[in-house]
Amino acid sequence: MNDPVADTVHELARRARVAARVLADTDRTAKDAALQAMADALLSDAPSILAANAADVQAARDGGTHEHLVDRLQLDSTRMSAMAEGTREIAGLPDPVGEVVRGSTLPNGLQLRQLRVPFGVVGIIYEARPNVTADAAALCLKSGNAVLLRGSGSAARTNASIVQSLRSAVESTGLPADSVQAVDAADRASAAHLMRARGLVDLVIPRGGAGLIRTVVEESTVPVIETGVGNCHVYVDAAADLDMALAIVLNSKTHRTSVCNSAESLLVHEAVAKDFLPVLVDALQSAGVTIHGDAAFQDASEHVLSATEEDFATEYLSWDISAAVVSSLDDAVEHIRTYSSGHTEAIVTGSLSAARQFARQVDAAAVMVNASTRFTDGAQFGFGAEIGISTQKLHARGPMGLPELTTTTYVMSGSGHVR
Amino acid sequence: MNDPVADTVHELARRARVAARVLADTDRTAKDAALQAMADALLSDAPSILAANAADVQAARDGGTHEHLVDRLQLDSTRMSAMAEGTREIAGLPDPVGEVVRGSTLPNGLQLRQLRVPFGVVGIIYEARPNVTADAAALCLKSGNAVLLRGSGSAARTNASIVQSLRSAVESTGLPADSVQAVDAADRASAAHLMRARGLVDLVIPRGGAGLIRTVVEESTVPVIETGVGNCHVYVDAAADLDMALAIVLNSKTHRTSVCNSAESLLVHEAVAKDFLPVLVDALQSAGVTIHGDAAFQDASEHVLSATEEDFATEYLSWDISAAVVSSLDDAVEHIRTYSSGHTEAIVTGSLSAARQFARQVDAAAVMVNASTRFTDGAQFGFGAEIGISTQKLHARGPMGLPELTTTTYVMSGSGHVR
């Protein structure tokens, strides 16, 4: 039963719990001072962080990692400045802790208040991008949670260097260094121990690809918030303005293809297919998009590939899109309910009843009416920053800001009340 | 791979999903009509339900079931009336579905609204008490969710009879009978398949003892809300009014011992121990409570048993209480954080700073200041009805009413907005 990796993770979690008690009782002024110190440290420690990152990048290239993954891993002074700036922005957001969610005085005179409080210890299990390290640390600290950061092995040197910088900064302002800790990614089992440390860790948030998220959901005994997989659809209704539809499809697909809120599938009502498909297919292909279409789409261009069942179920995260013509709004909803990952679904229509039906029936975290799928985003929603986009229904659904990193407690105050 | 029990559960879940789509789109008037019909049916079908219950009770007695468990299983006309009345009360509560949780118009003109929507399909896995069958069905229907009810084998005939009655009633008002379905309890594996039907079932709520809840939390891949285990403490502070403290301790322990919000452990500040312990120990013992105490409590009476580590960790649900003297508020908080199940913690004190510190530091779903632990209850909180008391931090914490049986969706409305 002696497992050194488990022991190490549990020891980190216990230290995080001690720090979490201090953080839960720390006011906004002190937390914001720590966040400003963290931002300062990211800038002043940039040379050593970039050196660590260069070693990670070199190792990745030596290992034959694809260049687009190397790009996600690589930091430069611009990205370092963005990390520091993001940390300062979080300092500027309201503190969710202590917010009275609801309150009342009961008929018997008891005073009931529901208050936001931190979770305690939050584990983040994530892939490549090292900016997640600073973002997650800042969001957790602001919401009063201690964080255990378990990044990918490929970014281990970078993440360790960032965490070291952040810990010194936090400690310099008088808060516990253990508010921010890295879990060693060298041993694959450390992630498994983190997600099974029920009682020590209050919440695990996986950020990464579908495989990582599936593993965490299957294996974790700690409560999980599932994030990010987006097989997002744009449905062009019979009552759509076709110029608007074209702009929304192009933006949803091509504005940034590697993100979860980009469109991966396209449905067009048959009433507008004859007019719209030639224009649409031409525009997508001119933009460099590969279309995997049904028979109607294939009729529109010889360059449209034949869509398989798997195409409709795939989150490409690339310059590909699946496409089909549907004979009704009901069919569009059925198709979406079959293949959707519950992230974002968009309808383009001038019909209020079509918009209402679509919004009620698609069952997604976000529904866009006459707007690009790309708007499902914490910053776009005005939340200031996000720890991820939840695609589950429990606790938080859609972009998760600071309030979603808290739980609540009821405080009831009486004068000797008994039942 | 062919598993008939799994196939049956999955088929029920698929039928529930079809019903859930209809329920999600059903207005309050129609849901309330179904709830009134359910209440009427419970009364008119009482003879057949009571006959089924008599068979369950007979089988339980024949199997040597303890009488206090038989009592939990047994229905009579009073309990049937209470079930019907409870259903009508739920009809009278506001509909949580469609509530706008927040909304704004963003700087770019996009209109953002966060709306409450049903989860979809909710599984309830519960023990003995057959009234849970009607309560859970009514709460789920009102919140627009289809429910899969997996009760205990010992109540199988009763639950089947209640569900048959409710299904006919629901159908008679034009809503789908499959809004309410029973999962056969004859095969133990049916519960396991229910909690692993991820993608078909949106949420599982276990209601029952610690063993059941642990199993569901460990095994489920469907998101779970943990309910009910309550190792609740009353802490009598140095600044307590001792008459008030005595009344609160007695009420918390003896008002009803078999429920999760009864007190199981008692802590007394040493500054008041000398005056308070003789009175307290005498009062508890006169009420019929067995005290498992530390040395100080044992000094107060020869009938105080010696408390073990396990006593402090136990939710007795009986006429027992563990008890200790602590040397400070900090020690009380430490003791509670070590042994608490995070349900309800009470402090009796006249000191505002002690009350504040206690509320901030104990980390529980509910904190009572100068009030009995027995107030942690949906009805007492004014929520009208509850599906359980959550002791987890994700999604809902404390008494769960109708809003906690919903999730949300963001609807964003634009006029061709792109990024």
Image (cartoon, coloured by chain):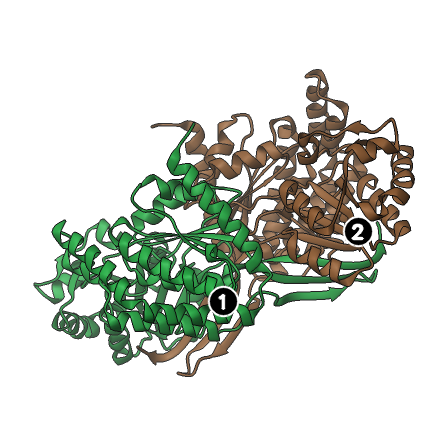
Chain colours: A green, B brown
Q: As shown in the figure, which amino acid type bears the numbered disc 1?
A: Thr
Name which residue lies at 73% across and 56% down: B381
Q: As shown in the figure, which amino acid type bears the numbered disc 2?
A: Asp
Q: Is residue B301 above or below residue A299?
A: above
- Looking at the image, residue A272 sits to the left or right of residue B156; the answer is left
Tell me the quadrant of the picture where the N terminus of chain B can be found.
Answer: top left
Q: Which mark is residue A173?
A: 1
**Any part of residue A271 in sight:** yes
Name the residue tied to disc 2: B237
Chain to which mark 1 belongs = A
Percent coordinates x, y for residue A84 in the rendering: 36, 71
Image quarter for residue B108? Answer: bottom left
Image quarter for residue B32? Answer: bottom right
Tell me the quadrant of the picture where the C terminus of chain B can be found.
Answer: bottom left
Q: Is residue A242 above or below residue A72?
A: below
Chain to which mark 2 belongs = B
Q: Label 1: how many residues lie within 10 Å, few (<14), some (14-19) or many (20+)?
A: some
- Looking at the image, residue B29 sits to the left or right of residue A342; the answer is right
Q: Are marks 2 and 1 on the same chain?
A: no
Name which residue lies at 88% across and 30% down: B301
